[in-house]
Image (cartoon, helix red, strand yellow):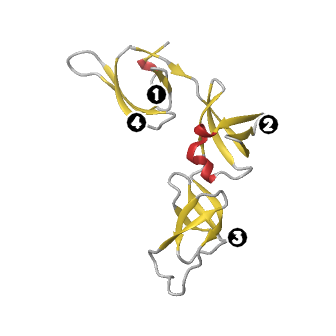
Amino acid sequence: MASTADIKNGVVLSIDGQLWSVIEFQHVKPGKGGAFVRTKLKNVVSGKVVDRTYNAGAKIEIENVDRRDFSYLYADGDGYVFMDTSDYDQITVPGTVVGDAANFMLENQAVTIALNNGNPLYVELPASVVLEITYTEPGLQGDRSTGGTKPATVQTGYEIQVPLFLETGTRVKVDTRDGSYLGRVND
């Protein structure tokens, strides 16, 4: 068991059976009364953010979370197979853990997976990826003005909104956090 003196940014705590990452912390020593630690915690799985206050010296449970680089290999039923780039071990991560990241993963893409006692917690992608548009309606002449968008399906099967002038076969940069179009990629 650790105490509140061990709290630092990035440390993962186990609270009521759930894992919470410390985003911010502040040791407070008021003029009157006992010292305390004010923290802002983010749930590792759901992403929910909460504020929590601990009395100074309170016992807390720190968990070991190992973030390692993996390469995405292929989808296998309801799971996704990744290979550890350091020792070439393969792991299968359930679709529920991968979540929306599956919309932006291509074979052999580098990802970071957070592991706790060998169990995958979440998959982290780069901030943006380059994907090819596999289908979109053709733009009409005169639709080249700014501001207009249309749906386009990328090679992973995910649908994004792109400007009207883009055509099937165009490679685009996509933000992995919200699926927004960032720009065209010229080869």
Compute the Cα span from label 2 to label 3: 31 Å
The label on residue 187 is: 3
Instruction: Determine which quarter of the picture holds residue 63.
Output: top right
Compute the Cα span from label 2 to label 1: 32 Å
The label on residue 49 is: 4
The amino acid sitting under disc 1 is Lys
The amino acid sitting under disc 4 is Val
Residue for point 51% across, 82% down: 144
Q: Badge 1: few (under 14), some or many (20 or more) residues near its Cα, within 10 Å?
A: some
When the figure is inspected, residue 121 is found, relative to residue 129, above or below; the finding is above
On the image, numbered disc 2 is attached to which residue?
88
What kind of element bears circle 1?
loop
Which mark sits nearer the N-terminus, 2 or 1? Answer: 1
Query: As rendered, which of 155 and 127 lies closer to the eye?
Result: 155
Which mark sits nearer the N-terminus, 4 or 3? Answer: 4
Q: How far across and down, in percent of the image, does residue 1 sit?
A: 50, 12
